[in-house]
Image (cartoon, grey):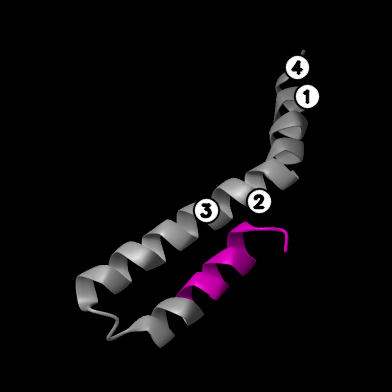
Amino acid sequence: MSIGDLGDKAKDLAGSEKAEGISDSGIDKTKDAASEKTGGKFDEQLEKGGDAADQRLGNE
């Protein structure tokens, strides 16, 4: 297996549904932790930031 083959395999994995679920879970946990620490004061901004991160990282 060549380096190019490994790169292609990594790209396929990163675009998979499993990777999407993992990134969504991480974003949600981060938003929840930040909301808890700030007493919900910045929930609107956290939601916008989470949506932007999901668009950047995820495929949905």
Residue 36: x, y in percent? Answer: 26, 70
Q: Nearer the viewer, mark 2 or mark 1?
A: 2
Mark 3 or mark 2: name the one nearer the start of the chain: 2
1 shown above or below 14: above
Q: Nearer the viewer, mark 2 or mark 4?
A: 2
Mark 2 or mark 4: name the one nearer the start of the chain: 4
Which element is circle 2 on? helix
- 56 inside magenta stretch: yes
What span is in magenta? 49-60
What's the mark number on residue 20? 2
The residue sitting at 47% across, 62% down in the picture is: 28
Which element is circle 3 on? helix
Q: CA distance from mark 1 to mark 4?
A: 5 Å
Given contact means CB atoms under 8 Å apart, are the residues at marks 1 and 4 in contact? yes
* Kind of residue at badge 2: Glu
Mark 2 or mark 1: name the one nearer the start of the chain: 1
